Amino acid sequence: MARYTDATCRICRREGEKLFLKGDRCYSDKCALARRAYAPGQHGQGRNRKLSEYGMQLREKQKTRRAYGVLERQFHGYFEKAEMQKGVTGTNLLVILERRLDNVVYRLGFANSRNQARQLVRHGIFTLNGHKVTIPSLQVKVGDSVEVPEKNRKIPVLAEAQEVIARRGCPGWLEADGAAFKGTVKALPQRDDIQFPVNEQLIVELYSK
């Protein structure tokens, strides 16, 4: 499977805003974007050209795709699925991304970043409704419960991540029980629950060309 192996902080610098890909580091003064707020590369500081309409649409799509750690083909598949559903296509797309199991693990505070959440899920650290799962892209449903079995609760990264959730906060559509290492999906996410700064209409316009 293809995956991004370059420096993660380059992505935030390329998009010009924090995507919180490195977890707790993004909140500190070690954040690369805070120290070098310009695009990476030899000519990064000279890239001040005004973007075209297509350029803005492309950057918005790339920013969203990279924030959730999804490859192009899968992201396009999510868009096609969102387009077939009732309601607003852009909102449907964001809801699909939010309902990914790796994102839910991240939102519940069991991981410092979505990348870390994806790795933990692949290693079988969590159960979904009592069954071991290893597929990060699984779509959760209302009433689903995500839990860390007793034998996996001593993993250091889980304890470290739970210290961060107090600052990051847990969205209203999820219910986290840190002491029990368990989280529950109370409802499907609504547009207001998604705080990620994205103009999803630009993505819809890009794919509608």
Image: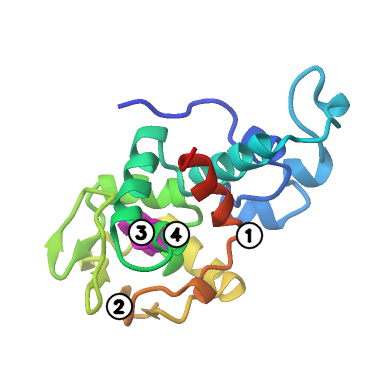
Q: Which residues are magenta?
A: 95-104
Contact between labelled residues 4 and 3, with CB atoms less than 8 Å apart: yes
Mark nearer the viewer, 2 or 4:
4
Q: How many residues crowd mark 2 within 10 Å: few (<14), some (14–19), many (20+)? A: many
- Tell me where residue 75 appears, x and y as whole percent: 39, 42
Nearer to the camera, 163 or 88: 88
The span from disc 3 to disc 4 (Cα, nearest Å) is: 5 Å
Amino acid at dot 1: Pro
Which residue appears farthest toward the left when viewing the image?
131
- Tell me where residue 147 appears, x and y as whole percent: 25, 69
Mark nearer the viewer, 3 or 2:
3
The verdict on residue 102 being magenta is: yes
Which residue appears farthest toward the top when viewing the image?
42
Say which residue label 3 marks: 96
User: Residue drawn at (30%, 27%), measured in percent from left and top?
Assistant: 1
User: Residue drawn at (40%, 73%), measured in percent from left and top?
Assistant: 189
- Give the mark nearest the N terminus, 2 or 4: 4
The span from disc 2 to disc 1 (Cα, nearest Å) is: 25 Å
Question: Image check: 83 left or right of 192?
Answer: left
Say which residue label 1 marks: 197
Q: Is residue 3 above or below residue 58?
A: above
Amino acid at dot 2: Thr
Any part of residue 158 in sight: no
Amino acid at dot 4: Leu
Nearer to the camera, 21 or 92: 92
Say which residue label 4 marks: 94
Please tell me whether mark 3 sits on a helix, a strand or a loop.
helix
Q: Main secondary structure of the magenta part?
A: helix
The span from disc 2 to disc 4 (Cα, nearest Å) is: 19 Å
Mark nearer the viewer, 2 or 1:
1
Say which residue label 2 marks: 184
